[in-house]
Image (tube, rainbow, N blue to C red):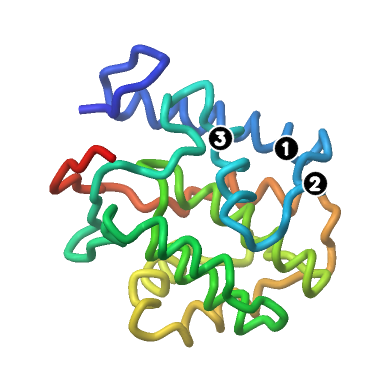
Amino acid sequence: MALENKLGLTSASDLAREEERISKKKALQLFENGTLDTLEAGKFSALATIHKHLFEDIYDFAGKIRTVNIAKSNFRFASVMYLESALANIDKMPQATFDEIVEKYVEMNIAHPFREGNGRSMRIWLDLIFKAELQQVVDWSKVDKEDYLLAMERSPIKDIEIKHILKQALTDDINSREVYMKGIDHSYYYEGYTTFKTEEL
């Protein structure tokens, strides 16, 4: 079953294809129209703006904090009950060094603030912080998908792996459209979410 969407699609595979096509187009717009340069790097407000832009043509919930609890495999992301306070705490986390930035990214991944589309939005958000603080970004073509997904899965307990993977892929080519788009082109998506309880806010 597909998530309820503005496209009227009922097939999950059809929705995934359209999601990828539309989000790539919208991500390119974000890059080319200068919107990213106006966002406050490291803040949830920046992530919400990115998410809204990528998915506003697909989902009513684009840019809005989720109202359901979600899980991946045996891992439950932050409870809806505590999500807003978790996001407020993440906003306050330091981001002056590489380690601090990745630790902030890991915490945002645990929060998983949106019903769908977290990974794509957060990779743009992560690069926004790297660019602002370190004058670098991740070249996602140098990141192995399986290694990345496993490292992210383990990151709430041990973040050394994801730090190593991302550090090896940093580049100074911060204004390259090609480098930017690789974060969207590569499907580093958490698939197979389970909604285990609905709690409307």
Horizontal side of 45 relative to 136 (left or right) equals left
The front one of 26 and 21 is 26
Q: Are marks 3 and 2 in contact (CB under 8 Å)?
A: no
Q: Closer to the observer: label 2 or label 1?
A: 2
Residue lying furthest left in this view?
196
Mark 2 is surrounded, within 10 Å at the Cα level, by few (under 14), some (14 to 19) or many (20 or more) other residues, namely few
Q: Quadrant of the C terminus?
A: top left
Q: Is residue 122 above or below residue 66?
A: below
Residue name at image x 70 percent, y 60 percent:
41
Q: Closer to the observer: label 1 or label 3?
A: 3
Secondary structure beneath disc 2?
helix
Mark 3 is surrounded, within 10 Å at the Cα level, by few (under 14), some (14 to 19) or many (20 or more) other residues, namely many
Q: In which image quadrant can residue 166 be found?
A: bottom right
Residue name at image x 61 percent, y 33 percent:
53
Residue name at image x 23 percent, y 62 percent:
76
Secondary structure beneath disc 3?
helix
Horizontal side of 198 relative to 44 (left or right) equals left
Disc number at residue 52? 3
Give, as a three-letter code, the residue at label 3. Answer: Lys
Residue 178 spot, x, y in % from top left: 76, 48
Secondary structure beneath disc 1?
helix
Residue named by callout 1: 30
The front one of 126 and 176 is 126
Give, as a three-letter code, the residue at label 2. Answer: Thr
Q: Quadrant of the N terminus?
A: top left
Residue 113 spot, x, y in % from top left: 41, 51
Residue named by callout 2: 38
Horizontal side of 95 relative to 78 (left or right) equals right
Residue name at image x 56 percent, y 26 percent:
22
Horizontal side of 96 relative to 64 (left or right) equals right
Give, as a three-letter code, the residue at label 1. Answer: Leu
